């Protein structure tokens, strides 16, 4: 099956041979790494080569709030227009898939941006705005997402901390074409439930506010528009994390499809197995440039509008890294290629730490995103 990556030297996932820092004793095992995650190393190299990156590119993006307002209004309008439409009608389903799922994926990723304090300078303003962006999604999750996501950055691949990693239970039972198809269809549920299984967050003020605001919004939608309007919003969220082109980013970002070029021009790119993959296609326009994922992990404090600038400034660091050409092809490749699957993730046993705002009254100096890492 053709590759979904642009790269020079390629090998299927289960043919990647162990090297000094990565071990994969059999095909039904994750790749275990015993080195530091690659983004910190590359970040330091880029700062040394291009010190202007941090000073010019890091910091909030004012445009984010206007995009959120526009998508919020779009979803509210669609929900109201469909208030008397059967949820099983073709009109309802097509609208939910084509417009609703795309819009709610955009809102998912706006919350991703906001979690790095990239909408406003004040941390509390970002927390509250994330709750607002959450409303058309129909289910409260923004308050819980932030600490889990920042821990994913600070603890990339660390077993028991990085909740983006599939568990061994998932990998064992879903290691088949049907299993992977099931995972791709319902992956939004896996990302919702898995973090709570790995470790639970304490229930804090911001979580309670998130829940209260969402329940109030949902009640008002049902009260003044009807159950079909709320069903549209929730179905949009489900489809956004299902077999939808934009949902391909969930798999594309960290599942190992192929090896990078062994002879990279830049020494910082000589890593045994790539842990992060970028995508430079047109769907980035709808998803806050989340496809520039190596760039994002290297500098989480750089907002979506400036990630392409980072890529151009430090292009010598990214040119040799394999990247995806299509998120739709990623989903297809992941499901049908028996050599790529749930086991194809890099894990490490040590390092990392839990990160995130746990109480509203703790927001401030201790919870500010670092100018470089964005995950203090």
Image (cartoon, rainbow, N blue to C red):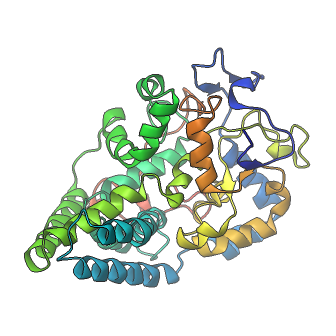
| Residue at position x 65%, y 37% in the image | 256
Left or right relative to 102: residue 135: left
Q: Is residue 313 left or right of residue 37?
A: right
Q: Nearer the viewer, residue 87 or 287?
A: 87
Q: Residue at x 47, y 39 (%)?
A: 181
Q: Position of residue 223 (x, y in %)?
A: 8, 75
Q: Residue furthest front?
A: 90
Considering depth in this image, is 245 or 71 the residue closer to the camera?
245
Please name whichever residue, 134 or 150, is drawn nearer the observer in this view of the structure. 134
For the image, the number of numbered tags is 0
Q: Position of residue 130 (x, y in %)?
A: 35, 68
Residue 133 shows in the view: yes
Residue at (53, 38) in percent of width and height = 352
Decide if residue 148 is on the left or right side of residue 359: right
Q: Position of residue 269 (x, y in %)?
A: 81, 45
* Residue 162 appears in the figure: no
Residue 129 vertical placement versus 137 (above, below)? below
User: Looking at this rendering, what residue extends furthest in the top direction?
Assistant: 25
Q: Quadrant of the N terminus?
A: top right
The answer to which image quadrant residue 73 occupies is: bottom left
- Residue 284 percent coordinates (x, y): 60, 68
Residue at position x 14%, y 68% from top?
A: 227
């Amino acid at each position: 099956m053709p590759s979904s990556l642009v790269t020079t030297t390629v090998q299927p996932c289960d043919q990647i041979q162990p090297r000094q820092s990565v071990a994969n004793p059999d095909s039904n095992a994750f790749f275990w790494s015993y080195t530091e995650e690659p983004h910190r190393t590359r970040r330091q190299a880029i700062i040394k080569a291009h010190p202007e990156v941090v000073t010019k590119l890091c910091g909030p993006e004012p445009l984010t709030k206007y995009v959120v307002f526009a998508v919020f209004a779009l979803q509210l309008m669609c929900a109201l227009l469909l208030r008397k439409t059967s949820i099983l009608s073709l009109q309802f389903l097509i609208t939910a898939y084509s417009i609703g799922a795309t819009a709610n994926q955009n809102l998912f990723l706006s919350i991703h941006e906001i979690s790095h304090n990239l909408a406003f300078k004040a941390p509390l303003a970002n927390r509250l705005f994330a709750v607002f962006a959450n409303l058309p999604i129909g289910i409260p999750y923004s308050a819980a997402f932030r600490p889990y996501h920042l821990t994913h950055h600070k603890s990339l691949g660390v077993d028991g901390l990085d909740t983006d990693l599939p568990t061994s239970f998932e990998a064992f039972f879903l290691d088949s074409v049907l299993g992977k198809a099931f995972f791709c269809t319902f992956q939004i549920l896996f990302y919702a439930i898995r973090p709570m299984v790995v470790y639970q967050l304490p229930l804090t003020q911001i979580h309670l506010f998130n829940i209260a605001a969402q329940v109030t919004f949902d009640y008002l939608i049902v009260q003044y528009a009807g159950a079909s309007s709320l069903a549209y919003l929730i179905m949009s969220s489900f489809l956004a994390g299902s077999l939808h082109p934009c949902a391909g980013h969930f798999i594309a970002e960290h599942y190992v499809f192929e090896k990078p070029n062994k002879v990279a021009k830049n020494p910082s790119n000589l890593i045994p197995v790539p842990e992060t993959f970028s995508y430079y296609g047109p769907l980035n326009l709808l998803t806050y440039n989340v496809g520039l994922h190596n760039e994002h992990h290297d500098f989480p404090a750089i907002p979506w509008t400036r990630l392409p600038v980072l890529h151009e400034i430090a292009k010598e660091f990214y040119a040799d890294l394999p990247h995806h050409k299509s998120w739709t092809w990623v989903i297809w490749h992941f499901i049908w290629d028996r050599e790529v699957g749930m086991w194809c993730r890099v894990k490490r046993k040590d390092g990392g730490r839990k990160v995130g705002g746990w109480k509203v009254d703790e927001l401030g100096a201790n919870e500010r995103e670092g100018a470089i890492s964005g995950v203090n």
